[in-house]
């Protein structure tokens, strides 16, 4: 499995609406930025609010880092970069719809990872309508981490604690699993702390040979293979709950047919029901 062309994360974008759900996503984005020492942009799209109000409402990076015991209280703004190696940018846009403003920002300033808060939805809207987060993920061609408003978090907002012990990866023959497996092992090394992270490779179908892969070995992780049959979305959600997965990593190939166009891709359907954060890896990153 040749992963030499799969890039490392060097830049992160977190769009925020200042909601509690966004705060959870912000914690994940900030922690990853710290661990990778990336550029980290926080973007808010408002309705012609004054700049003064917007800046006051933005997530407080330094206060969060002080609460996480990574900065001393009262540290100056430049300490975030000088001591922790993260360059923070805050951007406020107005006069656009939220989705179009985020996509316009990404068109001008592409990033490697977008971290988005998601809200669970019920009934027909869950089946037939894309959320703003899903539209952004479809169009950005970046890694996208969806953080649900309810359910597990592998980064805790209150103290910055990291808990990544199990990653679930649904796998089929296509699209290629190379990139998603590579990112799972990187996550295990960076976020697994002192534990060996269990990476569960889940195939839904009748061909267990799909899981006959040349898998990398390292004490930071161990692979487990599971083969099941049934509705892919239901099986993925059930497996995530059974194994208490801290995250789901999926390769996304976009919309494949008339039913996907109506209900959303498999990844999108899983996002809407996932009990934990989900990392969507674009198919193009596996080529």
Image (cartoon, helix red, strand yellow):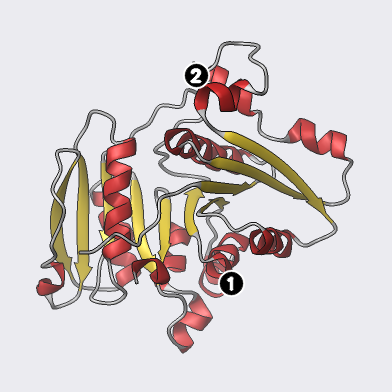
Image height of 268 relative to 257, above or below: above
Mark 2 or 1, nearer chain start? 2
Q: Which mark is residue 129?
A: 1
Q: In front here: 176 or 273?
A: 176
At which x and y percent is residue 17? 69, 46
Closer to us: 32 or 129: 32
Of 243 and 141, which appears nearest the observer?
Answer: 141
Q: Position of residue 64 (x, y in %)?
A: 58, 24
The residue to which callout 2 is attached is: 70
Horizontally, residue 182 falls left or right of residue 102, namely left
When the figure is inspected, residue 48 is found, relative to residue 205, above or below; the finding is above
Q: Determine if residue 105 is in view.
A: yes
Residue at 69% x, 58% y is 105
Element type at marker 2? loop
Q: Residue at x 56, y 41 (%)?
A: 39
Q: Is residue 174 above or below residue 269?
A: below
Query: Which quadrant of the figure has residue 97?
Result: bottom right
Residue at x 53% of width, y 36% of height: 30
Q: Position of residue 241 (x, y in %)?
A: 29, 50
User: From this viewpoint, is residue 241 visible?
Assistant: no
Q: What residue sits 26% from the left and 39% below the top? A: 165
Q: Is residue 144 left or right of residue 99?
A: left
Q: Secondary structure at mark 1?
A: loop
**Within 10 Å of the Cα at label 2, are there few (<14), some (14-19), or many (20+) other Cα atoms?**
some
Quadrant (top left/top right/bottom left/bottom right) for the C terminus:
bottom left
Picture disc at residue 216: none
User: Horizontal placement of 207 versus 103: left or right?
Assistant: left
Which marked residue is nearer to the observer: mark 2 or mark 1? Answer: 2
Q: Quadrant of the N terminus?
A: bottom left
Q: Residues within 10 Å of mark 1 (few under 14, many from 20)?
A: some
Question: Seen in the image, is 282 located left or right of residue 286?
Answer: right
Are the residues flagged by discs 2 and 1 in contact, CB closer than 8 Å?
no
């Amino acid at each position: 499995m040749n992963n030499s062309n799969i890039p490392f994360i060097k830049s992160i974008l977190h769009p925020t609406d200042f909601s509690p759900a966004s705060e959870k996503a912000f914690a994940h984005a900030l922690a990853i930025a710290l661990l990778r020492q990336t550029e980290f942009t926080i973007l808010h799209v408002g309705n012609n609010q004054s700049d003064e109000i917007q800046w006051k409402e933005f997530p407080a990076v330094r206060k969060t880092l002080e609460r996480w015991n990574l900065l001393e209280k009262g540290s100056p703004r430049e300490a975030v970069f000088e001591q922790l190696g993260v360059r923070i940018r805050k951007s406020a846009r107005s006069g656009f719809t939220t989705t179009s403003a985020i996509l316009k920002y990404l068109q001008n300033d592409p990033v490697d990872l977008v971290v988005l808060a998601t809200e669970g939805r019920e009934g027909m809207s869950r089946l037939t309508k894309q959320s703003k987060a899903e539209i952004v993920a479809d169009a950005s061609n970046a890694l996208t981490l969806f953080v649900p408003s309810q359910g597990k978090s592998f980064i805790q907002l209150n103290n910055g604690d990291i808990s990544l012990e199990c990653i679930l990866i649904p796998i089929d023959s296509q699209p290629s699993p190379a990139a998603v497996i590579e990112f799972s092992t990187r996550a295990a090394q960076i976020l697994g702390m002192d534990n060996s992270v269990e990476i569960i490779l889940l195939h839904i179908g009748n061909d267990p040979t799909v899981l006959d892969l040349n898998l990398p070995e390292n004490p930071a992780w161990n692979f487990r293979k599971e083969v099941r049959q049934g509705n892919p979305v239901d099986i993925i959600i059930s497996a995530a709950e059974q194994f208490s997965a801290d995250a789901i990593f999926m390769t996304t190939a976009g919309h494949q047919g008339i039913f996907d166009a109506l209900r959303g891709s498999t990844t999108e359907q899983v996002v809407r029901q996932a009990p934990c954060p989900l990392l969507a890896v674009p198919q193009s990153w596996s080529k």
